[in-house]
Image (cartoon, rainbow, N blue to C red):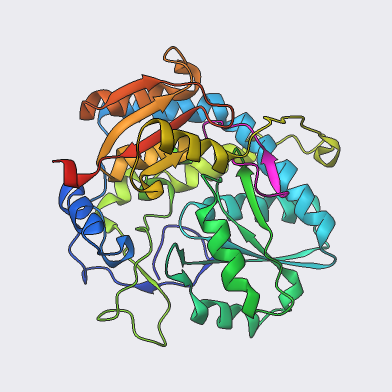
Amino acid sequence: MRSSYSEEDVTILLKDITGMVEPQPAEAREKLIQSGYHYCEMLPLEYKPGEKYFALYKEALRNYAGITAEAAAIVSEKIRKLYNSEITLVSLARAGTPVGIIIKRYLNKKYPDIKVNHYTISIIRGKGIDKNAMAYVLQRHNPQTICFVDGWTGKGAILKTLRKELEEYDGVSDKLAVLADPAHITDLYGTRSDFLIPSSCLNSTVSGLMSRTFLRSDIIGENDFHGAAYYSELEQEDLSAEFIDTVIGAIDYNIDYSCVKEENDTGISGYDEVLKIQKEFNISDINFIKPGIGEATRVLLRRIPWKILVNDLNDTKYLAHIFRLAEEKNIEIVEYPMKCYRACGIIKDMADI
């Protein structure tokens, strides 16, 4: 599978389906998903940011590279404590891929005696993990060295899928390492704050120019890895390396990140908060609710939003890019108090159109 990442940073276990699948515009795709098609059976058209949104991304990278670096270093130290001489990072494509690269680079520099491998594979809600990719990794590495990596937690659907799938893999830990865990569902986190991870602002141009992962039987055979497309037309706009280099450059290796503690007890789990939102806004399908800054951004970039909930309408520090996207798409923003999240996207029920 092609990507703009270096082979030293990651081995990508995906089938290249470039040119095999016609990307769908958001509204057509949303109607298909809500009529019964699975989201993994199609590809979205990539959102191309305008100058103002691009400037917001650059500002977010400047402002939050330090917080992102600290979270990456903290979770890296938590991972390091669980393993001995070898760690096999398995990042979940595609949001987990740059995070896995950052963790690998941190560990390589801080602990050169530890062997760090890194693969990126597909896992799909409702479909499961790529078993062919898992077989590839397990043929080469001790299962007890494997650590799964993603960007952040939303309401926990992917972690739930991961834990269920890993029941059939003896010796493989079902722990998931993330930069941010606002849902309060994993112990391997950098922070539980719902902060703006700059890479969540964009799609493929901060993800090695890869599409989200794809699974459909007419294109993905039973012995194939799950698929993804490569967007060569966006090579001039690729920011994948810049994002990783900027975050790595913000890490202070003189700090003992293994000693950093965070107290952030909200008194409610992320999932309970989602159930509360579902009830108060009369949402028919819980999958329409996408909590957290990263998930709300995804809703605006590639789904058809109904509303965006935010903790604070004046929170331009964390939510400026969300306000900008909502303005572009004429989406209502509602101030709504949340304990775990700063923002939450709600997908439009296409039956209401």
Q: Who is closer to the viewer here, 30 or 8?
A: 30
* Residue 292 in sight here: no
Q: Is residue 187 magenta?
A: yes
Question: Whole-percent x and y of residue 269?
Answer: 62, 39
Residue drawn where x is 49% and y is 18% of the image: 317
Q: Is residue 220 above or below residue 107?
A: below
Residue placed furthest toward the top: 314
Residue drawn where x is 42% and y is 36% of the image: 279
Q: Is residue 292 above or below residue 302?
A: above
The N terminus is located in which quarter? bottom left
Q: Who is closer to the viewer here, 125 or 19?
A: 125
Is residue 28 toward the left or the right of residue 160 in the image? left
Q: Main secondary structure of the magenta part?
A: loop
* Residue 36 in sight here: yes
In the rendered image, which quarter is residue 307 located in? top left
Question: Whole-percent x and y of residue 2?
Answer: 39, 67
Q: Is residue 124 above or below residue 15?
A: above
Q: Is residue 103 magenta?
A: no
Question: Whole-percent x and y of residue 194?
Answer: 57, 32
Is residue 181 toward the left or the right of residue 30 in the image? right
Residue drawn where x is 66% and y is 51% of the image: 103
| Residue numbers of the magenta segment | 183-197
The C terminus is located in which quarter? top left
> Total label count?
0
Q: Who is closer to the viewer here, 16 or 159?
A: 159
Q: Is residue 293 above or below residue 132?
A: above
Question: Whole-percent x and y of residue 321?
Answer: 38, 26
Q: Who is closer to the viewer here, 260 or 110?
A: 260
